[in-house]
Image (cartoon, rainbow, N blue to C red):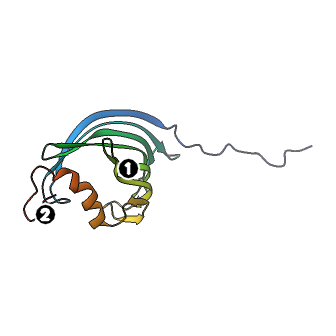
Amino acid sequence: MGLVGVNAPAALAAAPTFQHFQGSFTDVNSQTCGFPITISQNFASDVQFFYDQQGNLIRSLAHIQLRGTDSANGVSLPDTADFTHTFDFTTGINGDLGVTTHVIIPNRGTVLTDAGRVLSDEQREPAVRGRESPGDLRGRRRVLCRPCRVTAPGPGLPTS
């Protein structure tokens, strides 16, 4: 009996690589509340990089944890995040899935939560949006800014 067909092995993608990153950063947000909020975060990220058959980087998958505070006028609010970030190097699309922001007033509860799935282009312009609380920018400013303006409201802001 003759050999009718030969099954050649399919081309396999290169094996994924892994990297662990950790560190901290501090940033100042002066736009949201009209007064500076100092954001201090510690982060840990485990990243898996995926390659095509030619060894070209095509996609990354990162599990990210952030722990820190949002502070202003002597008030510090805990801020945490646990999410998965993806990046497609062929299309430039970013993806976040999970809780990307969770700010808490101690003994009172959650002030701000961003959760769900967000897709964005390379300029971080949203293509698909997840759940945001309370839902609109004005409401988000009110619930985030009110606890931090207790001591000294910024210019043009009402007193508590």
Residue 27 sits above or below residue 153 on the image = above
Residue designated by label 2: 158
SS at badge 2: loop
Residue designated by label 1: 100
Q: Quadrant of residue 144?
A: bottom left
Question: Is residue 122 left or right of 13 when viewed as pictured?
Answer: left
Q: Is residue 137 visible?
A: yes
Question: Is residue 31 left or right of 60 when viewed as pictured?
Answer: left
Give amino acid for label 2: Pro
Residue 150 lies, in percent from the top left, at 15, 51
Task: Identify which residue, 158 or 58, lies in the foreground.
Answer: 158
Q: Residues within 10 Å of mark 2 (few under 14, many from 20)?
A: few
Q: Residue at x 43, y 60 (%)?
A: 131
Give amino acid for label 1: Thr
Q: Is residue 91 visible?
A: no
Q: CA distance from mark 1 to mark 2?
A: 29 Å
Sequence-first disc among 1 and 2:
1
Q: Residue at x 51, y 47 (%)?
A: 52
* Quarter of the figure that contains the C terminus: bottom left
* Quarter of the figure that contains the N terminus: top right
Task: Identify which residue, 65 or 110, lies in the foreground.
Answer: 110
Residue 70 lies, in percent from the top left, at 23, 45
Residue 119 lies, in percent from the top left, at 42, 60
Closer mark to the observer between disc 1 and disc 2: 2
Instruction: Name, please, the residue furthest toward the left.
Output: 155
Q: Are marks 1 and 2 in contact (CB under 8 Å)?
A: no
